[in-house]
Each structure stands twice: as structure tokens, then as C-alpha cells.
Amino acid sequence: MTTYLLQRLMSAALTVWITTLAICFLIHLVPGDPVQIMYAQSATTSPEQLEQIRHSLGLDRSIIHQYIIYMGKLLQGDMGVTIRGQQSVAELLLLRLPNTLLLTLSALTLAIAFGGVSGFIAAYKQGQWPDKVLMTGTVVGISVPPFWLGLIVLSLFSVELGWFPVAGQGLGSLVLPAVTLAACQAAVIGRIVRSTMIDVFAQDYLLTARAKGLSKPKVLLRHALRSGLIPIVSVLGMQFAYMMGGAIVIEYVFSWNGVGRLAIQAIFQRDYPLIQGFVLCFSMIVVLVSVAMDLLYAFLDPRIRQE
Amino acid sequence: MTKPLSLLIAIGLLTGPAMASNDIIWARYGDIDSLDPHRTTSTLSMQVWNQIYEPLLARDAEGNIGPNLAKDYRVSDDGTQVTFVLHEGIQCHDGSEFTAEDVIYTYQRAFSETNPSNTQSAWGPIESVNAVDAQTVSFSFSEPFGAFIPFMADPFASMICKSNEQSLASFGSTTAIGTGAWQLVQWIKGDRIELARNEAYVNHGRMAGNAGPAKMDKLIIKVMPEAQARLAALQTGEVHIAEPPLESVSVVENHPHLNLLSAPNTGQNVFIEFAVSRPPFNDVRARQAVAYAIDPDMALDIVFEGLVEREHCTVARGVMGNDQDYCKRIGYQYDPAKAKQLLAELGYDKRNPMDVKIMTWTDGSRDKLLQVFQSQLKQVGIEVSIEIMDIGSLNARVKQENHITEGKGSMDLMGWSWYDPDILYQLWHSPGAYDGYNSPELDALLKQTRLETNPEKRLEIVQQVQAYLIEQAVHVPIYTPGWVWLYGVNDSVSGLKFEPFNQPIFTDVVVN
Amino acid sequence: MEQVIKTPSLCAGRLTWRPSRLAVLLGIVAALVIVALLAPLISPYDFEAMASGPRLSPPSWAHWFGTDEFGRDIFSRILMGTRLTLMVGLVSVGVSLGFGMLIGLIAGYCGGWPEKLLMRGMDVLFSFTEIVIALSLVAVLGPSLENAMLAIGIAAIPFYARVCYGAVLVEKKQVYVESTIALGASHFRVLFVHILPNVVPVMLVVATIGLSNAILATSGLSYLGLGAQPPSPEWGAMLASSKNYFQRAPWLLMIPGGCIVLIVLLFNVLGEQLRSVLDPRRKGES
């Protein structure tokens, strides 16, 4: 178990390190000069002044030198400042991150609840009409563009029916984006749960348990659900990553104040320090969550622990 | 499925939108760049910092210039000395008194050696600024500069309190000390700016009926980039004031609880300009071909459905020299045959079409306008690709394109808002805001528009400059207004006023 | 085990029924390809022509899907958009499939340090998540349809590589591979003649479902303004360009959006059918 843990942490650290390399070098592929963008509107900033600014930002040094400076700052928690507005990137991201996590986790919870229940029912009624209806529903679910669903949901439930606010600060405004984000992932989770549960139902020990005289609901809950949970946990890390990715677009559609919306804005404004910060922060979270999920998986499934 | 959903609905109904009753909530499509008036020229930023700072002078609804922070001003007979007398007892947001020292501080920041203001050239040829006493400040010029007084009434000449020096590193982002009716609480980048009422505020000349502090507690300016979400929030009453997407203006007009307000005298002018550093647009005939090939009247009609007007002049409505009849006479009429003829002279034909790009900035249906132009230009044999970007990137790109000497030709649909024909000097006197077109004759003419203080003679020169710019097809005017001038307002809101150049004033606003 | 529960007759019925469903789906795909190829010929109007009809007119006999804000015929634009959508799917899946299979084959077959290097690299890319890779690439390359589909293709490489790698490992363990090597076949021959054909069915299933992912992702980027630029009739770009007319002219949003759902649905269902036909071991998962 300890070696597994160590291995997993090592590879996570490696991933994060490669991320820092990638984002630092990627910026140099970009056409256009960030300093010029900052001072584009000024008719009076001379080329010498631009050069001075470039120097103060360290942009006139070699890539390796820049990377060392970047890493030095990063290790102190400094991700630089935004090109627009000169604000601390780290602070901006930290301020927005709770909102994104709130959205992602609410959506994930909803998706697991909906997906889990419908997958379970579909597996239980395999081949019968509930299974067919639910599985058709999930195929449609994974085929709907989330941004489009968001627009429709927004105009239906906010404007027409007036049930939910569009972009307030409270929990009420969380509902529509969370449900939209959950809808597509629920379909994916539903399918995974269904196929897992079909395998579980077919296993010998369940039949044995039934044969021992345990009642059907008890068997389902105690045995089937528990062993069905393990494969779900195994995909949870990946589902979380998908959700974080999906949240980017959903935040934009619903004006939800998270890091995703910030990132899209940064891309349009070519605010590279902010884009770098976003990519680093995003992949760090995804890596951490996937490590945590793998450990949970190892804890739940004894076979992995022994390997 | 139904149980969790209804539970969620219940939660939604319980919490509802979180807003205090004494706030004004204003949603816009984008965020500010900075609260430092010397660091940005975007309307989005200016509309916010204009609440925080004030200029020495102010304009009334007709654009006449009157007192504000300065109760009086004198221009010396030779035009090289301008003296302001300040009101006594004006307080900066930190409690310090606003004096001549603050005016000098503002000037020094604008002319900083290392980091001058983006609009430094608008201040004119200032030699020195001196405090005569605590309430009197005097500007000395090396030569007369007619555009100075109008500039002193503009938000770009906002007065920054010297006390900002103590927090200079955060100035413009987390701190901003001025004398305006609202003070900065916080700016959460990309999300919102919160301003609180300045309790010590006394109105000396701004366009508000209210002589004292604002009537509401807070002004919250939200960023809502997605137009549909902004419109929806306006419809549900979550935000009080928001720009509707231009395509859905009729939705606001027909809504029982929403009104549509239009800022008068925006000073906005949207025009086409060209990268003249390389073919094909280094040749005047190529630029003229574009001007003849487009039919702005038809395009505006399709895209804006009567919300904007055709603009024929290079300076905006309400600015000296804006004479539609004169400009129309010297301008270009839709004439595809003429365009084709010019293209043929340049050696372009069906098999060898002119291939160029056109850029503009996001929002305001400009992308749609370009699509119509694209289709019109195609008919005379000009292939155009469209690039849409954020305004800051566009400013940088236009400058870059003007430095590139080979490759695909480039033009752009650009917008500026300015209070004086001096805009033409800033755009086209070498090097110019974008390092674009310039010529010695044009430089000489533009120089004269600055030196001439007699209004009639100045107008004559301004008209010569316009004639030159239009004839050379350097600055092809298209329409006005151009951006964020429409306001969907909930009918619970009263007292919203607009200073010229699309500056909303919230001091009188009450939300019931 | 599940088969035991079912009645034999049902199983027999399924066997004859499934291939015909696959045939129907393939028929629809073929029809779509023909529509895409012939789009300029069968469009009732020029897809770019403004004022083909009155502006913002709802669906009618003259304009089956209505007209947009410029009076362009939406049906004609949807037809041209089909071409772009299929191209987007093919190009991005082509990129991910090509590179993904190459990496998977090499890593799976060679083992040793190439395996460690390549698969660790894929792990790293995988943890970036596809959307972040795609967004970063678009941020660097600039927004255009070509860049968007390239970015999405690249972003999906790790997924294809992993699947291919897994399939190669399974094949490598098969007895026939060992015996072929023992008989003196070259590595090249073993890899491309013996292993590859057995990996292809799995990859075909993945690629078919991948088509729908690529189409969804590209339309999303276009919707954000980071993909196809106006006046392209790419469906996501059509949505982006018309979204502000939603309350005035809902068909501008419902029609391109509906088309995306249908084409994505088609490839999802097709992928599953292919899986159940080509990969009978996983029949239960349908």
C-alpha cells in the first residue's frame, strides 16, 4: 500500500512539473508581444520604454532563464499579475476556485444520484421497458451540447417560468448551471453503473445470498450496491475531470463566477499569465483528485492493495 | 427523477437572488481594464472611473463646459497660460483635502518618464504646472493649445488624489482614491466592481439634480458576457440596468417592466481604416475601391434595424466639424462599377481577386456588419476574411499590422469617441495612435488645428483635414453610435442620467 | 451469466435483428455523406447569399428551416454545415486515431523504455483533460475552425493511445503472436500483419464514438467564438451568431442545435452497434 501511495504521488508530482514546463514554453509559441498588447492604446510609449517594461517583466531573457524565474516565483505562490488590470493571478484564481468547485461538486453529486439510480434501475430491469427508456435517455443525454441545453434551460426556467435567478450569488442561481452540467454526465455515469450492476447481479455470491434466503431488497442493497460502488469510484476521478472541463462552458453560458469563465475571458484578452495560471491550477486539481480517487479505490478494493 | 428536482426547485425558491434593496445593479458585457485613467482608454473602464474621479471642469447636456472641481478658470490672452481656481473643502475618499497639489500630482503621473499616460498627447504641449496657492493651479504651454479646456472636462483628465501615492502598487486595481460620488469597495476581476456612496460628496457641476451624496448605498457593476444571460437577468429583475443585445432590443421595448434608454451625444464614431504599410492598401485606389464597394446604408439597415445612424464625417456628432451635408458631398457613394474599375486598374480581376482581411472587436453586432460588407465586397471581387477579437487585442493588432510590410492586406472597423476634432491629430498626426497612415501635408494641416484658437478659422482647417482624410480614403466613416449606448432599465429605477459621451450618472438614481 | 436468465428465443431474435439495425445506421451515414458532398447542388439557395428571403422568417414552404438575420436560407446553410461537421469529425478523429494508434502500437509492442516514456507522457496529457488542452492550443494558435479541430484531435490522442495500448497488450499475450515470432517473422510483420488487424475493430468502435465527441467539442469551441468564424455555416458558429435572436426567432437556435444532437446521436448509436457486432465479448454492456 505504501509503495503504491508513493508511486502514485511521484507520478502526480511529475505531471505537475511537466505542466509547468509546458505552459512556460507554450507561451513562446504565441504570435504577438504581451507588452505590446498592454500598451497598444498608448501613442506615446516609446520603443525604449516598451523595452524597459519587457525587461522588468523578464521577457528579454532566455527561455530557460525565464523558466527558472517563473518556477522561483511559483514556489513562493506567485503566479504573476494579469496583463489587464495588473492583478495577482493567484489571488484571482483562489477567489474564483471555490465557485467552480461548488458548481462541479454539486453537479457531480446530482449526476451520481441521477446516473446511479437510473443505471441501477436499468440493470435491475435489464431488457425490459425501464431499461430501454433509460438507456435511450442516456444516449440522447450524451449527445446534447451542454451550451445549447444551457441556453434552453435558461430561457425556459428563468425567463419564462421565473423559477430560478440567472446569475445571483445565492444557492438559487446554482441550480440551473448545476443541473445542466449534471445532465450530460449523469448519462455517462448511468451507463457505467448499468453495466457494472449487470455484472454484479450475475455473480455467484448474489445467487448464493438469495439461495440462503435473504430477501431481495436486502441482497441488492447490502451486497450488490457495495460491490457495484467500487467501479464507480474508479471512474470518479475521471468524471470529476470531465465535469471541471464541462464547467468552463457552463460558467460562460450562465455567467457563473468561476475560473472557467475567467479563462475564456483571458483567452479573448490574450492575458497569458492568467491563462498559464488557469492551466496550472486546473491540472493540479485534476491530478490531486485523481490521486485521491485512486487511493480511495485501492482502499475499497483489496485486490489492488495487495498488488 | 422528480423528487430531487422538486427539492432543488424548493431550494431555489427559498434562497432567491441575493441582493440588498439599497443597491443599484448594472450589468455590462465586459470588465474594466484598470481604474487608472492613464492606463486604459476603454469605454467600459471609463464609465466606472468616471464615478470615482472627477475632472476639473464638466459638461452640461448640450456639451457646454462649466465649472466642477474648479469653480473658475482663466486663459491668458496669448493662450499659453491656463489658471484654475478650485472649490474649497472638497474631500478625497480617504478624507484628505483636494488641493492644487493633487492637480499637479495628476499631471505628473500623466507625463511620467517611465510610464506616461495612454492619452498623454491629449494634454497638449504643457511646459510646467504650478500651484499659485492651495486653491489655485496654473498650466503653462509652449504654444497655444485650443483643445485643452475641452479636455479638462473629459473623464480622461480625471483628477487623482495625491494620497494614492501611499498605495501606488495597488492603484487602479484594488485602490483608487478620487473625489467622485462613489468610492471603490472592491473589484473582483471578471465578475463585478462594487462602489459605495461617498458620504462627503458635494456636486459642483456634474449632471445630477442632487447636490449631495448619491441616494442609493451601493453601485454594483457586474460583468455578464453572455448576452442571453444578461437579457434574462434584466427580464427577471435581478439586474436593474443592462445593455440588451442589439438583436433583442425589441424584447426590451415590448417588456411590460423594462424601458429602453439611449445615451445621447455619445461622441462615438465607427470607421474603417487600412494598413497602408503594404499592398494593396498602400495604394489609394485600393482603399477607394473598398469605400465604393460597400453600401453602409443597406448594411446598417439589415444589421441594426434603425438603431444607429449613418455617419459621413470623421469627427463625431456634436464635435466641431461634424457637418453631414459637407462630409456626404466629399464622401463615397455606393458605386460597385467604380470599385471594379479601380480594381481593374490595380490588376485585380475575377481570376485574381484581391484577398484581404478585416478585423473588429467583439459585441455590438459588428461581426454581423462585417459579414454584410464581406458579401458586398465579394460582389466586386474582393475576398475578405473576418477576424473578431477583444478591443485591447484589436488595438495591439492594428498597430502590429501597420508595421508589417508584406503579406495579406489588412483593414479594420475601429471606433473612437472624442470631444474635439483633436481626435484627428491623435489618430493621424505622425506617428499616430496606431502608427498608421501619415503624410507631411496632413501633419502640417493637423498641426494648424492645434495652434489655431479662433473657432471659425479652426473649423475651416478641420474641414480641410476631413476632406484630405476622406479623399485619401484613410478614415472611412461608417456609423454612430457604436458601442454600449443602449440601456435596458427596469421600471423600478428612476433618475438615471447621461453626461455627453455616454457617461451614465447614478447620483440621482433611486430603485424602488 | 445473463444469457442464462434470458429465453433462448429472444437471443435468436436479436441475432437476426441487430445487423439490420447496423445496416440502417450505415445507410443514414452514407446518405449524410452524399448530402455533404452534393450540398452545393441540392441546396435550394446559395448558403452565403443574403436576402434569399425576408429576414428572420419562420420555417415555411419556401424556406424549410426559415431564414436568419441576413435573410440567408437556413436549410441551405445546414446542408453546407453538414459537410463541415463531417469534415471536423473526420479530421480530428483522424489526427487522434493516427497518432494515438501509432503511440499505442509502439508502446504496447516494444515495451521497455519506449513504453514507459510514451505511456507516462500520455498519462500527463490525460490529466490536463481534453478541454484544457484544446483551449490552450486555440489560445496559442488563434481561433479558426482548422485550429479548433486540430486542437481537439490532439487533445484526444492520449485516450486513443491508451485504448490501443491496452488492445495490443492483450493481443501480444495471445499464443499465436509468440508462435509467429518463434517461426522467425520480423517485428514489423508481427506488428502490422498479425497484431494490427486485431486491434482495428476496437479502434473502429472508439473512433466512431470519438466522431461524436469531436463534433460536440468543436461546436462548443465555435459557440464560444474560438472555432469557426462567421460567416461559416458550421453549426456551432451558426448558434453563436444567432443566439441573441433566441426570443425573437427561436428556430435559429433550435434547428442547428437539433442537428448537432441528431448527428452526435447517430455516431453514438452507430458506435454501440459496431461494438456489439465487432466485440461480442462486451455484448452485455450495449
Image: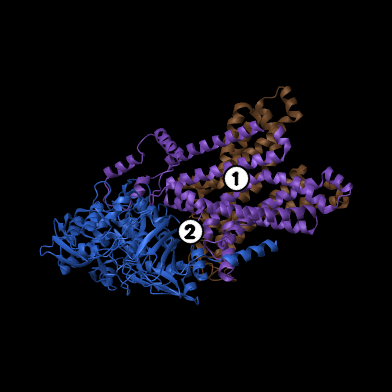
**Res C87 seen here:** no
**Display colour scheme:** by chain
Per the image, the residue denoted by label 1 is C93
Pick the front one: C51 or B230: B230
What color does chain A have in the rendering?
A: purple
Say the numbered circle drawn on residue C49. Answer: none
Front position in the image: A83 or B304: A83
**Residue A177 place in picture, x, y as percent:** 58, 59
Identify the residue under disc 2: C231
- The amino acid marked with disc number 2 is Pro
Q: Color used for chain B?
A: blue
Quadrant in which the N terminus of chain A appears: top right
Marked residue chain, label 1:
C
Q: Residues within 10 Å of mark 1 (few under 14, many from 20)?
A: many
Counting from the top left corner in percent of width and height, residue C186 is at: 67, 24
Residue placed furthest toward the bottom = B256
Rendered hue of chain C is brown
Q: Quadrant of the C terminus of chain A?
A: top right
Could you say which quadrant of the image residue B381 lies in?
Answer: bottom left
Q: Residues within 10 Å of mark 2 (few under 14, many from 20)?
A: many
Residue A43, position as x, y percentages in the image: 27, 52
